[in-house]
Amino acid sequence: MNTRKLEFEIPEVVSAYLQMDDDVIKSRIFKLLLADLASQGVISFGKAAELAGTDKIAFITELGKMGISYFNTDISDVLNDADVVSKAIIGVA
């Protein structure tokens, strides 16, 4: 995948509150950006998860731990996901 490098500065006082290394911060910012794009409907949560290198359930779970609810999405997405899960449970393709 092609990438684009972005650099930005944060105030030192904010940096003092970030008790994690730079790689963790970069990963978290990337996932927050993906979540924002998905929340706006620019990409799906499934695509966001794929770009984050994980599956949709793990992505949604991680967002939940960051205080971001998947259920702010359109109800049709939730119903579609429920349909996919129920078909998987009963073994229907």
Image (spheres, rainbow, N blue to C red):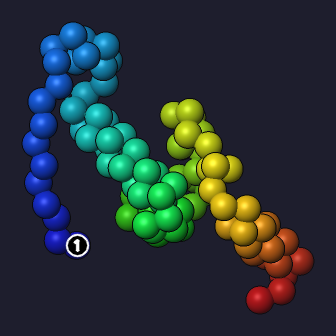
Q: How many marks?
A: 1
Graded by Cα atoms within 10 Å as few (under 14), some (14 to 19) or many (20 or more), the crowding at tag 1 reads: few
How far across and how far down the image is residue 91, in percent?
84, 82
On-image quarter of the N terminus: bottom left
Q: Looking at the rendering, which quadrant does residue 18 occupy?
A: top left
- Residue 88 occupies quadrant: bottom right
Say whether residue 55 is visible: no
Q: Image quadrant of residue 17? A: top left
How far from the left and from the top, in percent, is residue 31?
39, 48
Relative to 51, say whether 93 is above or below: below
On screen, residue 4 versus residue 24, left or right, reads left
- Compare residues 9 and 91 and report the one nearer the observer: 9
Q: Is residue 5 above or below residue 50?
A: above
Q: Return the residue found at the far right.
A: 90
Is 70 in front, or is 28? Answer: 70
Is 22 located above or below residue 55 in the figure? above
Mark 1 — residue?
A: 1
- What is the residue that sits farthest to the bottom in this orientation? 93
Q: Amino acid at mark 1?
A: Met
Image point (84%, 72%), residue name? 86
Q: Residue at x 11, y 54 (%)?
A: 5
Residue appearing at x 25%, y 16% in the figure: 14
Rendered residue at 26%/41% (across/down): 26
